[in-house]
């Protein structure tokens, strides 16, 4: 299939586009600007009218188009959204008055009417998101290169996030409104799951602003292309063949059904892990204050940790929880799972379960895995796990050794171990901290920068040059020392193009870091050199750790870091996609000639 067929509609397309525009304006005005009660009521009525228009379009599409099953298949997601909205709306009105009052009070709403209005807004927002994903999917049908779509989708999310953060209601009442550069910096940091901040997320941004940041790093952590592919699978509209082949290679999926399982597994696993993490964090918090506020705090930090975003609702990150083992180990577990990469997680789970006699006796499980037991883990998984474990051990032992008699001297042995373990995990692109980074010794900062450069596993929410790339470069160095003409790992030979890709990622990273430090030295020469280097490495590796100079940076330095965060997040993924993109083979080959290096 070379392109997407047109989506069947019941109402004229022009009407739907006008309705979508009104939905966008209504939601922005209602949440982004301070309004009176009369305006609120009018916009609530408009929202229900627009929801009715979208529902009528879905109903009429089944009535006017002859092949009704194809209509449902093409717009399955919209029908599910409509069905869920109607069910929740009916349940809201069927609830007894006392139960509805308790639910509204828990959600900080005044009545069940306001609850129904919020359901309508949620339905409209999700419908707009589906339309946007469909529009992005059409780019695949036009043959646009996946790496360009990847970069463009991230850029589009950043632009949208910047605009929303500029709205008056995005900042707390009494606080200075967010400027253009600060809004762009915050949106870039959230979308690229970095965590560097120029405004305090917990105090400077309102609940609406924090929700925008939350949505940005959730979307940035999973990636727009993941949602586009998911929508394609559930809408029975296959991606074009060239792009499908690329995604199958990227996801290590032999067939289209395997790719569908991978994509669905990524979204489902992310949701389950984030919900479990939020539940654990909620249990480890002090049972005081508002229950909804604790639930929001837990969900915000769980998603931020799993997406390796590093955003926190406290100005000192998680320093107030440095002695709370439950919070620390939950955050560390979420960071490690998010940095492992979805391919590694699915392979580990599948490898373990397929070798279990209990699961192999289940008919559903035999059908899912076609009765085949993987003989071994892939080289990518083994190499990624080996480098990751080595970096965690080196980081924890190194941090404890360097700071044991300095920053950790007033802590007990158990607390020192907990802090050291936490700070060995977070430089792998998470960005949380339980100790003030600006007070660390220079040697410790160098250690953290080394961990940030290596980063997380490929095809994950983390950044850096990636563990597998770093491992391949070490193996290439070993092969050169041993005078071998092949790079080998775990009984397998690494392809030459993979070695070139790993080397390219490392070279691009080094060049970008040098240019970034050079520009920051021009724009903010008064700041300490070590702080400038640390800031650039943190941005380029999408980590978010800082010695405390981010808010003091000039406009030029902030823009430089925006570019660094974008390159650090999009660059490695785009390079991997370009490697899998099939180009025209060369019809010639030059003779080889030895070149002296070193």
Image (cartoon, helix red, strand yellow):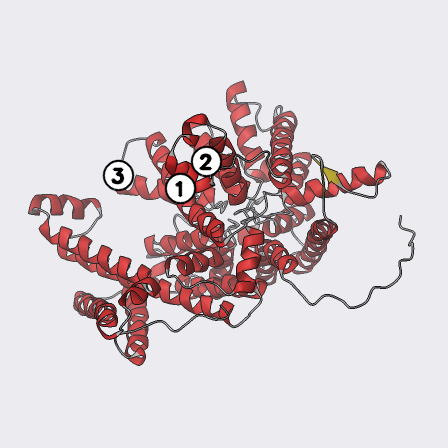
Label 3 Cα neighbours within 10 Å, binned few <14 / some 14-19 / many ≥20: few
The numbered dot on residue 560 is none
Alpha carbons under labels 2 and 1: distance apart: 11 Å
**Mark 3, residue position:** 291
Residue 49 lies, in percent from the top left, at 19, 70
Disc on the earlier residue, 2 or 1: 1
Residue 483 lies, in percent from the top left, at 87, 39
Of 365 and 516, nearer the camera is 365
Residue 490 vertical placement versus 136 (above, below): above
Give the residue at the far top of this rendering. Answer: 413
Residue 582 lies, in percent from the top left, at 64, 63
- Camera-near label (1 vs 3) is 1
Residue located at (51% from left, 49% from top): 195
Residue 199 vertical placement versus 53 (above, below): above
Q: In the image, 334: left or right of 544?
A: left
Per the image, label 2 sits on a secondary structure element best described as helix
Label 1 Cα neighbours within 10 Å, binned few <14 / some 14-19 / many ≥20: many
- To which quarter of the image does residue 54 belong? bottom left
Alpha carbons under labels 1 and 3: distance apart: 19 Å
- To which quarter of the image does residue 455 belong? top right
Per the image, label 1 sits on a secondary structure element best described as helix
Give the residue at the far left of this rendering. Answer: 97
The numbered dot on residue 331 is 2
Disc on the earlier residue, 2 or 3: 3
Residue located at (58% from left, 23% from top): 409
- Camera-near label (2 vs 1) is 1
* Count of numbered circles in the view: 3
Disc on the earlier residue, 1 or 3: 1
**Mark 1, residue position:** 274
């Amino acid at each position: 299939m070379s392109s997407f067929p047109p989506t069947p509609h019941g109402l004229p397309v022009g009407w739907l586009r006008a309705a979508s525009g009104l939905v966008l304006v209504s939601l922005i005005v209602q949440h982004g600007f301070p309004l009176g009660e009369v305006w609120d009521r009018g916009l609530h009525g408009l929202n229900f009218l627009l929801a009715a228009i979208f529902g009528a379009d879905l109903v009429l599409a089944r009535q006017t188009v002859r092949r009704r099953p194809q209509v449902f298949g093409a717009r399955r997601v919209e029908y599910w959204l409509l069905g869920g909205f109607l069910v929740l709306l009916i349940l809201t009105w069927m609830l007894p008055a006392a139960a509805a009052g308790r639910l509204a009070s828990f959600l900080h709403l005044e009545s069940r009417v306001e609850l129904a209005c919020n359901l309508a807004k949620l339905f409209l927002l999700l419908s707009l998101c589906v339309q946007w994903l469909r529009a992005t999917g059409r780019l695949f049908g036009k043959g646009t290169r996946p790496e360009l779509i990847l970069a463009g989708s991230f850029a589009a999310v950043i632009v949208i996030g910047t605009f929303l953060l500029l709205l008056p209601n995005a900042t707390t009442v009494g606080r200075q409104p967010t400027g253009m550069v600060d809004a762009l910096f915050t949106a870039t940091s959230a979308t690229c799951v970095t965590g560097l901040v120029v405004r305090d997320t917990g105090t400077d941004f309102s609940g609406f602003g924090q929700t925008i940041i939350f949505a940005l790093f959730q979307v940035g952590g999973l990636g727009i292309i993941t949602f586009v592919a998911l929508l394609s699978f559930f809408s029975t509209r296959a991606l074009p063949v060239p792009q499908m082949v690329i995604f199958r290679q990227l996801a290590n999926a032999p067939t289209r059904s395997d790719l569908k399982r991978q994509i669905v597994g990524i979204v489902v696993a992310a949701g389950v892990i984030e919900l479990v993490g939020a539940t654990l964090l909620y249990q480890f918090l002090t049972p005081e204050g508002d229950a909804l506020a604790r639930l929001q705090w837990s969900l915000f930090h769980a998603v931020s940790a799993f997406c390796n975003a590093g955003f926190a609702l406290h100005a000192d990150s998680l320093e107030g929880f440095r002695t709370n083992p439950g919070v620390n180990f939950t955050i560390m577990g979420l960071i490690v799972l998010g940095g492992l990469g979805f391919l590694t997680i699915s392979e580990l789970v599948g490898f373990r379960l397929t070798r279990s006699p209990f699961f192999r006796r289940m008919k559903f499980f035999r059908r899912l895995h076609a009765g085949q037991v993987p003989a071994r883990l892939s080289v990518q998984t083994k190499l990624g796990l080996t480098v990751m474990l080595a970096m965690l051990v080196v980081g924890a032992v190194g941090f404890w050794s360097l700071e044991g008699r300095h920053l950790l001297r007033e802590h007990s042995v158990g607390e020192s171990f907990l802090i050291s373990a936490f700070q060995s995990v977070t430089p792998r692109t998470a960005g949380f901290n339980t100790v003030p980074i600006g007070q660390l010794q220079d040697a410790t900062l160098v250690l953290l920068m080394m961990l940030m450069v290596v980063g997380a596993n490929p095809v994950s929410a983390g950044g850096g040059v990636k563990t597998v790339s770093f491992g391949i470069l070490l193996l290439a160095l070993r092969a050169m020392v041993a005078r071998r003409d092949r790079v080998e790992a775990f009984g397998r030979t690494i392809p030459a193009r993979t070695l070139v890709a790993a080397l390219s990622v490392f070279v691009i990273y080094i060049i970008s870091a040098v240019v970034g430090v050079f520009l920051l030295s021009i724009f903010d020469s008064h700041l300490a050199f070590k702080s400038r280097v640390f800031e650039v490495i943190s941005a380029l590796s999408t980590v978010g750790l800082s010695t405390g100079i981010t808010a003091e940076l000039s406009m030029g330095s902030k823009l430089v870091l925006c570019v660094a965060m974008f390159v650090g997040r999009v660059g490695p993924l785009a390079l991997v996609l370009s490697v899998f993109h099939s180009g025209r083979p060369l019809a010639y080959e030059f003779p080889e000639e030895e070149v002296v290096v070193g």
